[in-house]
Amino acid sequence: MIPMSWYLALSAVLFTIGVAGVIIKRNAIAMFMCIELMLNSVNLTFIALSSFFRDVSGQLFVFIVMTVAAAEAAVGLGIIITVFRNRESLDVDDASVLRD
Amino acid sequence: MSDILTFIVFILLAGLAIGSALAMVAQRNPLYSAISLIGVFGALAGLYLTLAAPFIAAVQIIVYAGAIMVLVVFVIMLLNVEEEVRRPVRLRYLVPTAVLLAAVLFAEAAFILFYVNDAPAPPSPLATAEPSTTGLTASIGTGLFTTYLLPFEITSILILMALVGAMTLARRTAARPQDLVVPGAQVLPLQMVEPARVGDDTPVRSDTTAEAARTLGLNEQEQTRE
């Protein structure tokens, strides 16, 4: 049986990679995907704890996190398309002012 | 025997997940990043299976790899994103800072993990008890429609809000008028002012239809008749 701490460590590693990606990446879509990675690593923690404590609540939380991620994907990609239409660029350095 | 098999599966899936995540951050082409992220999602779905959560594993594949990533890839191809160009970076120490901050975060997580490991073991570990029914669809459905009914309904409101928000954001706003528009006046195509000139889209600025016709010098007879 795999110890629970291994799953939690894997989740921490994935979350850290996601955080580093959000800081390093300059492309809006790539940053968006790094945020998805962070959400998934949290999901892994939820599932591991839920499975080891035999409590279904964690899996329901994952269900809701997935819904939030889907909503975030729809709205985030809408914002990205709008920014691209106004600036012809996906680089977040180009989108440094709020007007226009 | 089964333990060794589980161990090998875990190592393979964890390696696939970490490798794909690193590849995603390292790639410069967003499309390759997206494909690497699909690899992470697939590996995580496999890990959910090893954790006896088949329903969430299926939802992971359907929702994440199936819906969200298709949307992302669609947007990447719609916007025709090319590779990230190397340009003079404004924040030169970004990568070292990112790695440092990520290391600090990871150290914190590791500290908490090992601290928790000193705590008493979970009351009912999966290994000792009878097979778990926690991850099965029936128990998730029961929980979703009894204890967690209110969050479930709030989720539907959230989806509705996201739907409306995405449509509002992505709607193409009206083209900006090229010439000056006097407040209170309207710009009409000539076709609407003078029905005889079908297909003529010359813009006419006016307060009223008759005034537009007068501006253009059209329709003189009708105006005198009036």
Image (cartoon, rainbow, N blue to C red):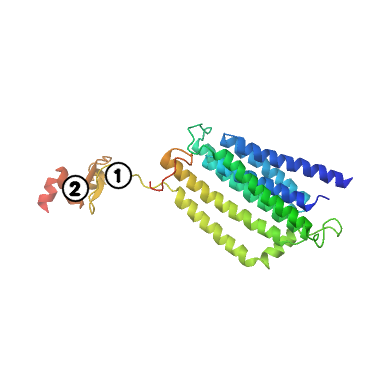
Badge 1 density bin: few <14, some 14–19, many ≥20, Cα 10 Å: few
Q: Residue B6, percent across and down?
A: 82, 46
Residue at left 78%, top 42%? B11
> Label 2 near label 1: C-beta < 8 Å?
no
Q: Earlier in the sequence, mark 1 or mark 2?
A: 1
Amino acid type at circle 1 is Pro
Q: Is residue A86 above or below residue B128?
A: above
Residue at which label 2 appears: B212
Asked whether residue B56 appears in the rendered view, the answer is no
Residue at left 68%, top 48%? B107
Q: Residue B69, percent across and down?
A: 60, 44
Badge 2 density bin: few <14, some 14–19, many ≥20, Cα 10 Å: many
Pick whichever, A19 or B27, lies toward us.
A19
* Same chain assignment for discs 1 and 2: yes
From the viewer's perspective, tell me whether residue A84 is left or right of residue B185. Answer: right
Q: Quadrant of residue B94?
A: top right
Residue at left 14%, top 47%? B214
Residue at left 65%, top 38%? B22
Q: Residue B103, percent across and down?
A: 65, 45
Residue at which label 1 appears: B177
